[in-house]
Amino acid sequence: MPSRKSFNFEQLGLDWARPGLIAGVDEAGRGPLAGPVMAAAVILDDHRPIAGLKDSKQLSARRREALADEIRALALCVSVASASVEEIDQLNILQATMLAMRRAVLGLRLLPHRVVVDGNRLPVLDCPVAAVVKGDSKIKAISAASILAKTARDQWCQGLHERFPDYGFDGHKGYPTPAHLAALARLGPCAEHRRSFAPVREALLTRALPP
C-alpha cells in the first residue's frame, strides 16, 4: 500500500481513510511550444521506500534520471502516457493534459482504488480522484509521477533535437526561451511545434507575409 507518512489523506474525505492502492499522477510539458504533453501514474510500495522523492523541478537532471530508475524498479507499478501535438492543437492544452493523465492511469498494471493528481484539475476516471495543489512536493506518489513524466519528456526532446538540431531542443526542451523564439523566427515551425500556441502562430504568419 502507498505511504501515508507525508500527507494526511483523510483530509480529502472519509473515503480516503479506507485501505487501498493510491496512484499519484502528474504531467510534464504543458508550457513548451513543441511536442506532446506527458503524464505518469505511480503506485508506490511501502515495503520498498525510495529516498529523495520530491518535485522533479527541484532535482538535477542526473538525480531525476537516477530516481526514475529506482521508481521503475521499486514501485508496485508505473505507467507513462502522452497526448500528441495534434491532440493538443485540437483539444487545447488543458484537455490534452487530462487525456494524457487518464491514459497513464488506465495503463497501470494494477487498478488503483483512488487517484491523487497534482494541481487543481481532474481527469475523468472510474475511481475516486482528488486534486492536490503542490501535490508533487507533498505526496510521494505524485513526486514519483512528476519525475517519470519529466524524464520521459526530456528524453523525447533529446530525440527531437537529433531530428531538428538547429532549434536547440536539447537545451530549452521546447520552452519559449529567447534562443527558442529566435530559432522559431529564423527557421519557422518544425513538424512538432504546437500550431495553437501564440508564438508558433505568429511565426507562421510572419513567414507567410510577403517580403
Image (tube, rainbow, N blue to C red):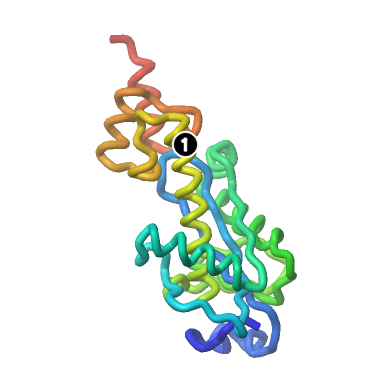
- At horizontal 38% and vertical 58% (from top left) the residue drawn is 61
Where residue 38 appears, as percent x and y from the top left, is 54, 52
Place of residue 160 in the rendered image (x, y in percent of width and height, measured from the top left): 47, 36
Percent position of residue 62, x then y: 39, 59
Point 31% across, 36% down: residue: 180
- Furthest toward the top, the residue is 211
**157 left or right, relative to 179:** right
Secondary structure at numbered mark 1 = helix
Q: Can see residue 119?
A: no
- Image quarter of the C terminus: top left
Tell me, yes or no, if residue 2 can be seen here. Answer: yes
List the single residue furthest toward the left. 178
32 left or right, relative to 40: left
Residue drawn at x 55%, y 68% is 71
Q: Position of residue 159 (x, y in %)?
A: 49, 39
116 over 172 or under it: above or below: below
Q: Nearer the viewer, residue 13 or 149?
A: 149
Q: Which residue type carries mark 1?
A: Leu
On the picture, is 18 further left or further right than 205?
right
Q: Is 211 in front, or is 7?
A: 7
Question: Who is closer to the viewer here, 100 or 171?
Answer: 171
Residue 168 vertical position relative to residue 113 in the rendered view, above or below: above
Q: Is residue 128 above or below residue 178?
A: below
Residue at screen point 52% across, 70% down: 142
Q: How many marks?
A: 1
| Residue 103, above or below 1 | above
Q: Which residue is mark 1?
A: 160
Using a 10 Å C-alpha cutoff, classify the residue at mark 1 as few (fewer than 14 neighbours), some (14 to 19) or many (20 or more). many
Q: Kindly indicate the quadrant of the structure image that contains residue 172.
A: top left
Q: Quadrant of the N terminus?
A: bottom right
